[in-house]
Image (cartoon, rainbow, N blue to C red):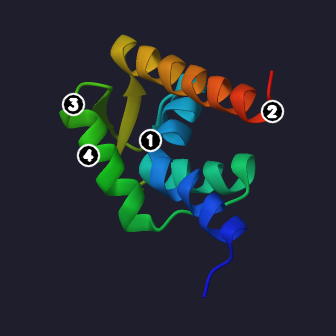
Amino acid sequence: MTTPMERLRNKITKEVLWLYILRLLKERPMYAYELKERIREAFEFEPATVSSYVVLYKLEKEGYVTAEWQESHTGKPSRKYYILTPEGEKLLQEGVKFLEEMVSKLKGE
């Protein structure tokens, strides 16, 4: 049985993974595995690899990110880099604003 805090952590991390992905893509284009590692470093949780790919696919399909293949110059396979679109940046701002408003209400401000 999970505790209320464990459920809260899951809801505001793994279930809104798109927010964390968009936030990191605001810094620079990244490939999927790199995003997964950066989420672990920056936000201290680790999404499932499949989840990251599914979320990226949906974000791309909905126009919040674009993707482009980049050839490696070191013999490694090509990588698909994801790039934040203006629509993605707007969605990120809306998501963060919503969370800030909810936290403010919870604090009674």
User: Disc 2 and disc 3: Cα gap in Å?
Assistant: 34 Å
User: Disc 4 and disc 2: Cα gap in Å?
Assistant: 36 Å
Q: Is residue 98 above or below residue 59?
A: above
Query: Relative to residue 87, is residue 29 drawn left or right?
Result: right
Residue farthest to the left, as pictured:
61
Q: Residue at x 51, y 27 (%)?
A: 95
Q: Which residue is mark 2?
A: 107
Q: Which label is found at residue 18?
A: 1
- Mark sitting earlier along the chain (3/4): 4
Identify which amino acid the numbered label 4 is placed on: Tyr
Identify which amino acid the numbered label 2 is placed on: Lys
Q: Label 2: few (<14), some or many (≥20) within 10 Å?
A: few
Q: Which label is found at residue 40?
A: none
State yes or no: discs 4 and 2 in contact (Cβ < 8 Å): no
Q: Which residue is mark 3?
A: 62
User: Disc 3 and disc 1: Cα gap in Å?
Assistant: 12 Å
- Under circle 2, the secondary element is helix
The percent position of residue 62, horizontal first and vertical second, equals 21, 30
